[in-house]
Image (spheres, coloured by chain):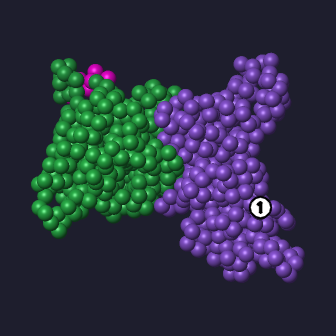
Chain colours: A green, B purple
Amino acid sequence: MSKYAVGVDVGGTTVKLALVSESGEIFKQTSVPTLGDQPPEVTVNQIRDAVEEFKNGLSPKDSIIGIGIGVPGVVDLDGGTVSYPPNLKGWGVVRLGDHVKKATGFETKVENDANVAAFGEGIFGSGTEQESFVMITLGTGVGGGIVINRKIYRGVFGGAGEIGHISIQQDGPICACGNQGCIEVFIGQQHIVDFAHSLLPMFPDSPLARIGQERRLEVKDLSIYANKNDQLSIHVFERVGKLLGVALTSVLHILDIRTFIIGGGVAGAGDFIFKPAEDHIKSHALTSMRPSVKLIPADLGNNAGILGAAAMVFKG
Amino acid sequence: MSKYAVGVDVGGTTVKLALVSESGEIFKQTSVPTLGDQPPEVTVNQIRDAVEEFKNGLSPKDSIIGIGIGVPGVVDLDGGTVSYPPNLKGWGVVRLGDHVKKATGFETKVENDANVAAFGEGIFGSGTEQESFVMITLGTGVGGGIVINRKIYRGVFGGAGEIGHISIQQDGPICACGNQGCIEVFIGQQHIVDFAHSLLPMFPDSPLARIGQERRLEVKDLSIYANKNDQLSIHVFERVGKLLGVALTSVLHILDIRTFIIGGGVAGAGDFIFKPAEDHIKSHALTSMRPSVKLIPADLGNNAGILGAAAMVFKG
């Protein structure tokens, strides 16, 4: 007899669902479009249908022991309440956990998606040997999740870990959040591309100079050409790494957690970002706090959400 | 029969010691010069002598149940080990807790002084109704201590809470710590005075313009004249408050702790600093995290060290 959890990752465009074993294997996986403009019942029903399908596919000896859901927004653990998730305009304040439990009959845990991804890395990914770490997801935005002694650190009201909205430049550009000089304004995906485009005239010999005239560059382009020793790409990532290092130095000074797990699409650039980030921390942090600092690439990739959500069921 | 604790505050120039009751009353108090250039045994002996004197003054019914010590530096809880405190050059790595216990016979707890001050505010000061808060001490430097669920949050290696070394300006001035643009570089006491002096030519009618030509200003001068509606002083404190708000917004985003207790000499300026700091947080933090944010003045003043150290004995 095996126990399974259903991990659900409610993204801005897709709801991903998976049937996950206790050891973190994905046995079945499906996805449906996120209908965030519609009332939350629509999403609850999508989840119910998928869970039903997973259940029907199980042998009679096996069982689902619960559902974990990651959502983009602040979550109150009471009833798994999601409040005004910015990318799910039709939702308002929703007791998602209660609704899904009622619709499916399974215990349901709901958490902020960045926290879920961090928890997943701790249970199934590159954080299994780390009691405490900070996870940073580099993508469209810059997300964060804090794990202390193997538990998600949520703060007093559940909003902790918003690493992307640390201001590293008090007089810097305005962030979408309204704050000024947030790290996200410098190293969010589109800002990286903007920065690369702004440098094209200074690197006329870079292959990206030609590509950048034909179409908008992507971070992926920079990764590819950095690996071919393109100085423009390397320069852009060096700046991304350095600025990430500024923010992480502040995180280190506040939390004294020295392991940083870095995931998300932009982290695909690997050491081109990791190295300057780690160099910056180790040359700028308080001397006593420099030892043991390390940056580790995340391990779960696009499955961080579903695996982390399932991990909450098994170990949350 | 009453129980007492000895609270010890090892400062850069003075070691303060007090006999403190369980309710936080100071029954006896003494101080000796800090002989930080000499080996730590000298300080241990000073503590031993003062404790002996306190003990001899007690009635036979009363007893001392332990000693708490706050020191300026990173403390490892194992043996109360202090490592290379910057202001105690003669110390190196010292198992201060073990030494004081051996010399006095009393259980001894040792903690970083900023953590001690925060803990003291939580037990005896303005934090008694707060489960979780961040304490910031505005003085020569900018210190910090984090209390989560009534316990000091130390981080993985004991260095957490270094609020003063959050960088708010990645290309800003170099801090004494080696980092760039630390909040301390902008609002440490001497930096505030420097800023005030730099503004004197722009405020020729300010009474401080004359005083500032005769001698170096002090933050106290600014406090006095701010209360007399001096625009220079008010302007300086507004900037201090705003920049403090930038750093605290980042702390809020990381920790989701919304109560900030502000102490230290510079905090004597009160609302001239608190108001712009709170305004900045409430206009720049993530919308969902703005409610409940509050800044509270610390309550224990110069006794925060000895009372916090004693509190560790009673409640630590």
Q: Is residue A85 above or below residue B85?
A: above
Residue A266 visible: no
How many marks the image carries: the answer is: 1
> In the image, residue B138 lies at what x, y percent?
68, 44
Image height of A226 relative to A193, above or below = below
Residue B68 among those drawn in magenta: no
Q: Chain of mark 1?
A: B
The answer to which image quadrant residue B243 occupies is: top right
Q: From the image, which quarter does the C terminus of chain B lie in?
A: bottom right
Q: Please give the residue where the numbered disc 1 appears in the rendered image.
A: B24
Residue at position x 13%, y 53% from top?
A: A56
Name above or below for residue B269 compared with residue B311.
above
Q: Nearer the viewer, residue B158 or A132?
A: A132
Indicate left or right for A105 with B207 as reference: left
Task: Give the x, y percent position of residue B222.
Answer: 77, 32
Depth check: give the residue in front, A222 or B56: B56
In the shown orientation, is residue B222 left or right of residue A255?
A: right
Is the residue marked by circle 1 packed among few (<14), some (14-19), or many (20+) residues within 10 Å?
many
Q: Amino acid at mark 1?
A: Gly
Q: Is residue A173 visible?
A: yes
* Camera-nearest residue between A235 and A35: A35
Residue under the point 33% across and 29% down: A90
Q: Is residue A200 magenta?
A: yes
From the viewer's perspective, is B257 left or right of B72?
left
Which span is picked out in magenta? A198-206
Of A177 and A214, which appears nearest the observer?
A177
